[in-house]
Structures are given as C-alpha cells and as structure tokens.
Amino acid sequence: MLKLQPKFDLRKDVEADIRRKEAEVCRVKDYSGALDISILNTERDGGILYSWEGSTGTTRVGKYDANAKTNKLLYSFDKQVCVSSCSLNKEETLLAVSLAQNTHGEEHLKPMSKCLTLLIEIRPINNTKVLKAVDCRVKVQFLHPESERRSVHESHLLLLTEDGYVDQYHVLLTRHEGYKVVLANPERLSKTAERVAEDFCWVQWDVHTQRLYYLTRADKFLLRCVQFYDNHNCESVLALPLHLPVNAFSTVEFVNLGFDRHYAERRQPVKMEVFTNQLGSMCVCYSRPACDKPELIYTVVLVHKDCSKTFRVTLGQPPWDAVQLQPIFIPIGYYVIVYLHACFLHCINTRQQEMLCHSLFLSGDDADLGLASKSGTFTVLRAEEESSTALLDLVGGTIHDAQLSAARLLQILRSRSPSGRPHNMADAQHLAALHCLLLHSGNDPNVEAQIIEWLCDNIKVRDSFDQIQEFILASLYRLSYQRSLSLDKLLPCSTVFDMKDVPACLTEIPGVLCTTQLHTECVFKGKARCLPGFWSELQWNAERTTYFEVDPEPRYRTSHVQAYWSKLMTEKPSGHMTHMLENAKKVLALVDARHFDRKLVPLFQEEDHHQRLLIGLTAEMLREHLNRHLPRLGKKKIDSLVIDYIAKLLELIRHMLESVWLKHKLGPHVLCFTQPAGPGEWAAFHFMLRILEATGGLCMPLPPGYHTLLAALALRCLPHRTFLQYVDHRFLRLTDTFVSRLLTDLDNSAANERLKFGVLKRLPEAYRFYQMWDHPVSSASISRDYVRNLLGRRNKNKGFAFTGRDKADFGTEFLPLTYLAKVLSDIEEQALNPFGERGNVDAAFVEETALKQTLILLGFETK
C-alpha cells in the first residue's frame, strides 16, 4: 500500500564510515569488531545523531548530514556510557546528552543517579556542565529557530523528564580568543531554567514546527500545546479536552532510543500522536484495546473540522495483548493511515470525513503495507510542508520516505471484488481508491491515463455511484484542496453528498463501527487568535466549520445551474450574456494555451454558442458562491480558481476522449458521414454518451464541438430512425455545424432525403438551413418564406403602389403567377433592404420555383 523510497540506512551510510575510522585508530586494514550503533535523534535540518562504542573502550557521538551525505564526529567520552538522548544546537557548538546509569557494568555515573544530563562544549572542546542528576530518564532537545540568522550569542535547550515537567535553559555564549564560542557564565546556567510545562502524563515534541504537545489530567484529560517562536519565546496556544480511559497514561516512561517526538511507554496500552498541516489542519490520534473483546478502539480528533470520529474494529484473532495492539498512525497528505500489523489498514480521509466511503479500509492480506518490521517498531517523522512522510525503523536502523502506492491503488480499483466480498461491497473500496489516487497521484499523466482506461472498461453505471462523475469531481477538487480547507465545504468533491438515499454499501464497513462526536470544545489562547500562519488558519477553519453548519446549503451544487440555464435559454441577447461569453473566452483561451499542439480529437474547432453560454454561466455562479462564503481568499484568487476550475473540467473531458481515440486508433474520418462505423466508432460513441449523461446530471458544460462530434458518431452508428429518436429524447443536440455538414455531405438518395427532412423539421423556427440543400423542396421552402415575409411587410407599409411598368420577362401564360411576380417586383424596387434576410432570393427565383412545383404537382416533371 505504501511506496517506500530509501532515505537513510544506518549500515550503509554510517557503519561503513565508522569502520574506516576505527581501522585508523587501531592501525589495521579492516576493522571487523562488533559495533553497537544507536540512533539518538534527528534535528530540524535533517541531521541524524547517533552513538557507538569504539574499539578503545569509549563511546562516541556522531552526526550524519543528510544533505552532504557525510559523517562527522562530534564528541568522544573517555569511557563507555549509555547515551539515551542527545541534541545538537544549530551552530554545532554545543552538545546536550542524557546518560542512563549502566547497571550491568562496573562503571557508574557520578553522582550516583539513574540519569545524568550534560551540556558539553564541542567547538572548541572545553567545558562540561552537569544540568541534572535525577532518578528518571530525561530527553534533551535544542530549539532550532527557522530564521537564517546564525547567532552565536545564545542557545535554548529543553529538558523533558519522566517526572512530568519540561524546563527550558537559556544558554548564553560568548566568543573567546576571537573565534572560540564558550559558555558565558557556566555557574549561573541552572538559574536560567524556566518551567514550560508540568504535571504531564504524555508529551510529544515536534521538531519541524517547534511545538510541544503535552497531556495533563485533573478532572479530565486536557491536551495543551506550547508554541516556540524564532525569538525563543514560547506561549501556550491551545487547550483541547480529550475523552480517554482513566488509566490511559498512569506513568511516563521514555523508550531507550531517543527521538525527536516521543511519548512514551512500553506498558501503556494507549498510543497517541498529534499531526498538523500548514493549511491549518490538526489531527489528534489515539488508540486503546477493548477491555473484554478482541477489538481495537481508535479515535481521530479533527480539530479543524470541530469533530471527532471513533472506530471500533473487530479483530477476530485471539488472544491479543497490549503490546501487540499498538497500531501505527501515518499521516500522508490529509489522510491518516491506521495500521495494525497482520490485521487491518484504515486510510482515513481527514477532510471529507462525513462518509465512510471516502476512507479506504482493508483487512487480511490486502492490508499489508510492505514494511520489513512490525508496526510497533516504527516512528513517524513528518514536516508540515512536505506531502510525504518519513518512517524510521528502530530495529533496522533505516529511514524511508513513504507515499501511497499508485500501483496498489490501481490494483484495488481494477479488482472486481476485493477480499472476496460481494460486488456491491467492493464499491466503497473502489470509490475510496479512486479519490485517493486522484488526490495524491492525479498530477501524473500516466496515472490519469490508467484511471481513464479503467473508466472505458467499466462503462456500466454502478448502482451506488457514477464513476465518471466521481472522476470529474475528485479531479476538480484536487485543484482547490491545497488552497484553503474551507473549500472542502464549498466545492463539490463527490456525488454521494447529493444522494437522497445513500446505499448501505457506502455507509457501512463490515466489522467496523463508527461514531461521530461534534464540537471538540477546542480553546485557542494568547497570540493564536492573531498569529499569522498555522494557528490563524486552524482557528479560521474551526470557526468556518461552525458557520457552515448553520448555513443550509454551503456547498456549491451544480444542479442549481439548471434553473438559471433554462431561464437563460428563453431570454433575448443582453449585456449579461455578453459578460458570460467573455468569461467563456477566458476559459477557452486557457485551455487552448495548455493544449496548443494537441489536435487529436476534433474539438474546440467551432463557435458553439450554446456551450459557451453554459461555460460562462457556470463561471459566474461559481464565482458568486465563493465570494459570498469565502471572501477571505480575495477576488483575484477566486477569479483565478474559477477559470482554472472550469478549464480543468474541459481538459478532463478532452483527455478522456483522447484516450478513447488512441485506444481505438480513430482519426478525422469519424466526421465522414458516408463511411460505415466500425467497432472503434461504436466504443467511442458509447463512451461519449456516458460522458454526456454524467455531465448532464451535474449540469456541467462540455467542450465546444462535443455535441457535433457526438451527433456525427451517432449518425454513423445508428439507423436513421433511431438517430432521430435520440434527437427527440434530447440525447443528441443538433448543432449548426452538424446540420450544415449533413446537408452538404450526404447525397439526395431517398433514405438521405427522409433523414434531412426529419432533421430540418426538428430544428427551431429560427434556424433555417434550406439554402445549403440543393433540392426542389428546399427551394420551395425558401420561396414560401420569402413571399410570406415580403407580403407581410407590404401589409404593414400601405404606402407601396404599383409603378405600372411593363416587365418584359414576365410571361402571360399563367396570369396568377404573373400577377404575383409583378407584385413582388414592385415591392423589391421600393423596399430599402428587401433581401437582408434571404440573401439571393428575388422575384425571378420565386417564379421559377413556383413553375417547377406546379409541373411536379401536375405530373409533368419529377423531382
């Protein structure tokens, strides 16, 4: 399920270099002695701190620079010690270490204590200062401000103890002999200590965001957060009550291997993690086993959504103990993966959390993450600004970048019945896998092409959801989900939210019980209300969630366009329509700019007024909706989002058509009406009908030229009578381009004449294409319209009078016709613009047409 990319290997990146150094110390060619290497910490810059026991009976501390791929020796103890925690300041002049008492050896720490915490000058090697000597383990961590200022005047160190308190030491430095950096006042160092937190039963340090999370308990459990700023000040900014078992964290016990975020316990049955994202999302994840059942209970508190979701998963495998029931929480993008080795995997959507079908749940063999070790041996390292997550294997000594595997998700998407379940139960997995793929790998053209191929091979509409509609909405949602969390409630991302009766297969997961609790009672404190960045975004998102709960319809629904669209079709051209057409020009210009050299499918080749109006209307309504509910984004950003949104919609449809064209090797000949349709044309026609049905249900515009292409394929694939029935039932829309090609490309055989008559009589009264068809009936129709309009004008203008001039070209054989021709000729001479609407029509043409029709009716001539 995960795609793992090696980032660090203790044996390859460190051990080989250490053996070379030990060989130099021992003056041997190759050092083959045992090496006990322990990873101690990772700093904000990606550096990895480690220790090992040297060949001369000493313990050494080194750093691996992830950027330069080099190792550096930081400090050597003159005897073997057990380093349980370690941290290096940003300037690499000070090293803080926590030494655990070695109860098995002869050497003991002095003074006698379980843990000794030291502050060591390493550049130059000079003073060593004892900070604490206590009977509990201590974690050490230097603050690493984000600013580029490399100050040598001060460093700031955190000490986290198992006794349940955190102290911050303000270490003042000074230059000595011009270049040496040493402690300014070592004897007063202990007096600079400042208590940051106390009485906690769980603690986590986030090195990337410089935040300290800790849990206290009085009447109830309360999660607090302390934010450290670049000026080294800190402030408590968050208080969140949590509903945990009474004995959730009885004591604090740090693990032997130090790490940048640890809470800790080997015996504690509850596991807890906090994850944040720079867009303003916060997830608090914790798990616990059920007391009397083979179940695992885990909760994900979505602070940004002002709710929490608790899941109870039946394990069905006896017996499980507390150590085995330690899942790992892995944040990837805005998904949180809950993974229990050899049992289940739950990929939870933390932004579209209302429906279970948008979260992927796998069990049994399908749930294998592909990790080399059990889940309990992994530690998660993640920076807010990164989309991937780093996993540290504490046993194997490796770090891997983890991303969701597109290949595995495609495999789930293509499987007909994952895990042997009934077909309808697989729909939820298909839907979740589709959304997961599009949001995490949708920018990859190869992945998008494989999804479209899956759509082509699964054209049949499912009972639970429409695949093409979900593909379109999820792809469009990907454009906006990185801009603002508030767009989650404003833009459509799935058709499931619009269903009146959601199928049970999309709301239930066998063996999983989900309960939702609204309102997390999160309290923001201090500067969090006005602080730019993460905290202001988080507070804004929480407040907007409350606002959206009051609004009856905060989400933009494409179905609302339908009513306005029907009204617009009955209106006369106006300035409002002109504005919409200008919106459409911007969208189509963006599409053409992105696909200037791609002309595989004959689209965007014509003026399709109908679709251009719909494009402009959609842009207008979407812009108005976003401006009303989310003015914080600003008009420029909203305009850019709207144009990009609709352009992406047209591109998606074009990509689907291009895939079908390439798959069936179609070309420009699809617009040739005289050639019979082959299997490729049939497949393309069927798929285009599915796209038409999907977009019609969403009332979304199509690329100009789509209806022309669909009608051309329908004419080649369907019998003429069936074709006309498709037109009558509005499956097909007759465009000007299609009708003109129909009249000019097809000959006047009996079958084609019937087809042309059927098409012409189905056109609105305002559309007349008789001039394009060289046929007696067409000429008669033109003449009748001409006479009707001209005589109608004469009735309105009574001032017209006959000139009385003789017309030499009028015969006297047929007096009624001669009189009519004389009337028309006089009107033509006196009218200012008599032929403005009918082009080359004149009295002579009407006379000739009338004579022709008369001869046909009398049986003297055939058509």
Image (cartoon, helix red, strand yellow):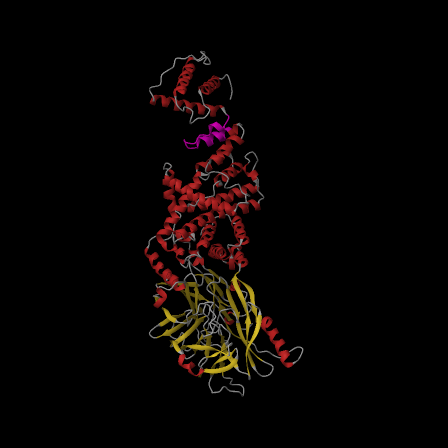
Q: Position of residue 71 (x, y in %)?
A: 57, 73
**Residue 767 inside the magenta-drawn segment:** yes
The residue furthest front is 178
Q: Nearer the viewer, residue 592 or 516?
A: 592
Using the image as rendered, state which of residue 543 and residue 340 is in the foreground.
Answer: 543
Which of these two is toward me, 147 or 242? 147
**In this view, 657 is above or below 769:** below
Indicate the position of residue 213 as horizontal and vertical percent values.
41, 71
Let me know if residue 516 appears in the view: no
Give percent across and percent down for residue 750.
52, 27
Q: What range of the chain is rendered magenta?
A: 753-774
Residue 88, image x, y percentages: 50, 75
Asked if residue 791 shows in the view, the reply is yes
In the displayed structure, 697 sits above or below 192; it is above
Identify the image quadrant of residue 781.
Answer: top left
Q: Tell me, yes or no, whether the highlighted magenta stretch contains residue 773.
A: yes
- Number of marks present in the image shown: 0
Left or right of residue 68, residue 567 in this image = left
The residue furthest left is 550
> Relative to 197, is 733 above or below?
above
- Using the image as rendered, state which of residue 195 and residue 619 is in the foreground: 195
Residue shown at 42% from the left, 82% from the top:
188
